[in-house]
Image (cartoon, rainbow, N blue to C red):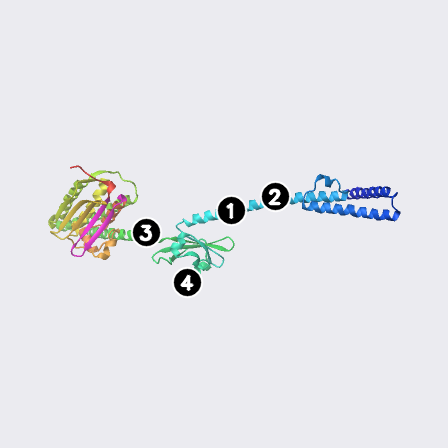
Amino acid sequence: MTSITRLVLKEFAVLVLLIVGITLATSYFFSAEINVVLLFASGFILYFSQALLVASLAREKLPIFWRRTLTPVATYIVESIDEAKNERLLLNCEIDRLKLRATNRKNKMATLVRDFRDSLSVLPDAIIALDRNNRIEWWNKAAGDLIGLSGSIDLKKRIEIFFPSGEFRRYIDNAKESEPVEIVAPAFPDKLLSVRVTPYGDNQRLFQAQDITRVKQLERVRQDFVANASHELRTPLTVIHGYLETLIDQEISNPEQTRSAMAQMYSQTTRIKGIVEDMLTLANLERGEKPRSEWVDIGDLIAQVRLEAQALSGEKDHEISVEEQYRCAINWNPQELHSLISNLVINAVKYTPASGVIKLRWAITTEGGCFSVQDTGIGIERSHLSRLTERFYRVDVARSRESGGTGLGLAIVKHVLGRMGGELSITSEPEQGSCFTCTFPSELVRQIPQ
């Protein structure tokens, strides 16, 4: 027997008991017709009250007393409503739990996206998120600086607006991850960018631009260095090779000719030796290894270099003087300090005409120690001053080679000063002379008590 059948039987039993009870109670007082009316009225009142109780239960929980007055069918309905309420409560709890879980996940994803964008914002490379139509959706600070993006004005603009060249348009139409293209930066025409566009997500693209200006400059410097070094070494080697061919192919009986050839070859090998030594010095300086430091008496070092310069001057008979404001010492590697000062002084000797004046000065300023070499030499055009410290750069190539210069002296000076944290400044006027000034950090300089 099913539960529905049992419920119907119970309800029928209740009705039978109701009819029997009312009939027995009223049969002695009323006629049969009135008894029938009473039966129908009692049944109506009974089920109407049951309906009211069930309706009340739908709004609020019924007390136990009223529950006991319910018929089986009403009790079944009330229990079903209670179960539905409990299920709804459990369902609401589950919905609230899922909502909270979804909110937490959303907040976590928002935090991850924000952190990811923050990390992209500090990258030195320009990063731009593009949609499927190459419209800008987001960019980092580097992109704003290099490409000139600003605020909401440039949001949703096509990236081609900022790179109008045909080369870029062809590239972005057929972009592949392994094929970057080099484009001039829109906001800085003197900067070169390496641009790469990478597909990601739902037909979106990630635009990445790297400033390769410095890399290209270093590549150019390297190429120039190799070319210049090869040229500088080829000239003396050609002279030596020519003399050796002459000595091998021809029988030279005149001792003077042999002596002259040997002297020329010795001069050229000396020049090669100087170039190689300066190149090795530069290589050691560029390795960046911290040198062995000690306190070096700058006055004694300047005096030593002055004697070397006087010997180099020879018949030119330069007037070389030293002015020392304070007796000081510098805490640095003695060999590097000697190379720095001697290169400046020897340059002055080489490019100052006979009987010229060369002044070596040491002083203390608010910025630190200051060493300068001033001469009355041939001077330098202002347009050349910014390039004097480049390797193998010469204002007058013929005169420089004639004087025996390697073209690396000032590059060595610049590197030594850079390692020390100092600065080199140059002032010069053609036919009036030049002044090279080195400033040393105050923490490397101390006065020597008299």
> Identity of the amino acid at label 1?
Asn
Q: Position of residue 202 (x, y in %)?
A: 52, 54
Q: Residues within 10 Å of mark 3 (few under 14, many from 20)?
A: few
Q: Which residue is mark 4?
A: 166
Sequence-wise, which precedes: disc 3 or disc 2? 2
Q: Main secondary structure of the magenta part?
A: strand
| CB contact under 8 Å: marks 4 and 1 | no
Give the vertical position of 373 relative to 294 (above or below).
Answer: below
Quadrant that contains the C terminus: top left
Which one is closest to the eye, mark 4 or mark 1?
1
Sequence-wise, which precedes: disc 2 or disc 1? 2
Q: Quadrant of residue 154?
A: bottom left
Res 179 visible: no
Residue 161 painted magenta: no
Give the vertical position of 92 relative to 196 (above or below).
Answer: above
> Identity of the amino acid at label 2?
Cys
Q: Which residue is mark 3?
A: 218
| CB contact under 8 Å: marks 3 and 4 | no
Q: Which residue is mark 1?
A: 107
| CB contact under 8 Å: marks 2 and 4 | no
Q: Position of residue 395 (x, y in %)?
A: 22, 55
Region of the chain picked out in magenta, as a range: 419-440
Q: Is residue 86 left or right of residue 181?
A: right
Q: Which residue is mark 2?
A: 93
Residue 426 painted magenta: yes
